[in-house]
Image (cartoon, rainbow, N blue to C red):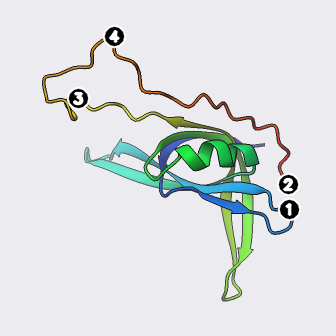
Amino acid sequence: MQSVIIEGYLAAAPSILAAQGSGKKRASFRVLETVRFRRGDGQMGERTTGFNCVCFNEKTAEDYISPYAQKGSRVVVSGHVENDTWTGKDGTTHYDLRLIVENLRIKAKPERAGSERGPDTAREPDAEPEPRPDFEPSLDDEIPF
């Protein structure tokens, strides 16, 4: 099995979808990862790759992804790769890869220096940290396929 770990940003808010037969919920989202590099001629370049991701764990989709993940959230996703095939409206068969999510971590956004406090103020060392969700997702559910 191909294991993959991706760190990137959510391209849009995740979609929470229900299966037609069972009604089980799943989360579907796209993660964008940008790699910066120096070309042979010394110029800087970058390449952005999008990954279609699906999380079949219903509890994780409803209790973690839905309330906390939003467009632009920085995430670390791990899972395995599967082939995805579908037929378009014009009858053409399409092929794609998708990442089946086994673990997802939403990273906190770093605090910008000087935002809302002025440029010379720093955070006091005794200040309370921002509250973080105490939810630790369990991914022990079976994947329905």
| Nearer the observer, 90 or 117 | 117
Question: Who's the residue at 74% across and 69% down the image?
Answer: 85
Q: Earlier in the sequence, mark 1 or mark 3?
A: 1
Sooner in the amino-acid sequence: mark 3 or mark 2? 3
Q: Which residue is mark 1?
A: 22
Name the kind of residue labelled 4 in the image: Asp
| Residue 42 numbered tag | none
Disc 2 packing (10 Å; few <14; some 14–19; many ≥20): few
On residue 113, the disc is 3
Quarter of the picture holding the N terminus: top right
Name which residue type carries label 2. Answer: Pro
> Dot 3: within a 10 Å radius of its alpha carbon, few (fewer than 14), some, or many (20 or more) residues?
few
Residue 126: which numbered mark, if any? 4
Question: Which is in the foreground here, disc 1 or disc 2?
Answer: 1
Q: Secondary structure at mark 2?
A: loop
The answer to whether mark 1 and mark 2 are in CB contact below 8 A is yes
Q: How many marks?
A: 4
Answer yes or no: do the residues labelled 4 and 3 have beta carbons within 8 Å? no
Q: Residue at x 27, y 14 (%)?
A: 124
The quadrant holding residue 22 is bottom right
How much space separates mark 1 and mark 2, taking CA atoms? Answer: 10 Å
| 3D distance between C-alphas at marks 2 and 4 | 48 Å
Disc 4 secondary structure class = loop
Res 144 label: 2
